[in-house]
Amino acid sequence: MLDLKTVQTRHVPVRCYEGGSGPALVFLHGAGGVTGDDPLLNALAEKHHIYAPLVPGYGDSEEAPEIRDMLDFTLHTWDVVEALGLKDPILVGHSMGGMIAAEMAALQPNDLSRLVLIAPAGLWDDDHPVVDMFSTLPFEMPALLFHDPVAGAATLTAGRNVQDPGFLQAYLVANARQLGMAGRILFPIPERGLAQRLYRIKAKTVIVWGDSDKLISPTYAHAFKKGIAGAQLVSIPEAGHMVTIEQTAAVVEAVCSLG
């Protein structure tokens, strides 16, 4: 279990999970958020010093109305890295976090040498549209996120009764808060011109994708690989968008391949 701490940037206090020992690794979470008992973070913490900052508005963190668009998200996250006192950490991003990580690597290519993008958002192909999570009902999510929807549903609910009014109320409030923030870059489609900036990335890059991803098609894995010079693609079978949970060991192996 990682500890939850607060780091102060110039504009906003940021809640950040931290733990482990070894080379510094910054993990940027997806639109669903992250917790201190996340299996991937705790597995990585066996070999790395993990920093997992929450996007403002997630968990118990303050919202940040001044973060309005992709550039704001990118600069804010670089501010977090600076506030943590880190120089050239391994940068790992999943889904929405992968989109932010790729933008960070493109914006400041000389400040980052190792990058892992796990099923990142950020590109758009009319033939393979990314699912609109903002119009997706809760009961539809497991089939979109997991290779095994039954096991995925159990993971998402943590064994709680989804019919319980208290659970639903807490879920809907948290979801509205978080997706309200995520929507600033993901709604109506997660396309902010990243495709035209991928060429700027100089970091040694590993792209990780679950073969059964139904939220963001694995087709996008090849688009990212084509756009980033020298990028390595790791395709993982029997895993959906939440490959970080379904095939944790394989993702850890891919991250550790960067050293």
Image (cartoon, grey):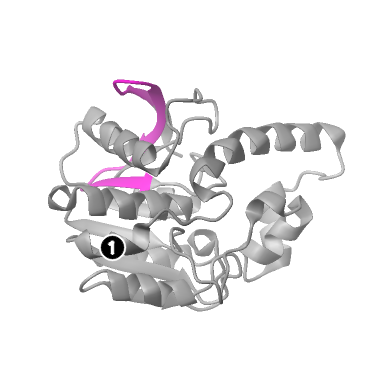
Quadrant of the drawing holding the C terminus: bottom left
Mark 1 — residue?
A: 198
Q: Residue 13 in the image: state x and y as whole percent.
A: 39, 21
**Residue 224, image quadrant:** bottom left
Q: Which residues are magenta?
A: 6-27
In-image side of 167 versus 4 (left or right):
right
Residue 90 seen in the current view? no
Q: Position of residue 170 (x, y in %)?
A: 73, 32
25 falls in the magenta region:
yes
* Horizontal side of residue 57 vs 21, given as left or right: right
- Sort mark 1 into few (<14), some (14-19) or many (20+) by Cα contacts within 10 Å: many
Judged from the image, the secondary structure of the residue bearing numbered disc 1 is helix
At x 40%, y 27%, the residue is 14
Q: Is residue 62 visible?
A: yes
Residue type marked 1: Leu
Residue 22 lies in the magenta-colored region: yes
- Residue 57, position as x, y percentages in the image: 53, 30
The structure residue drawn at horizontal position 62% and vertical position 65%, both measured from the top left corner, is: 146
Characterize the magenta stretch by its predominant secondary structure: strand
Give the quadrant of residue 189.
bottom right
Tell which of 254 and 241 is nearer to you.
241
Left or right, 222 with reference to 79: right
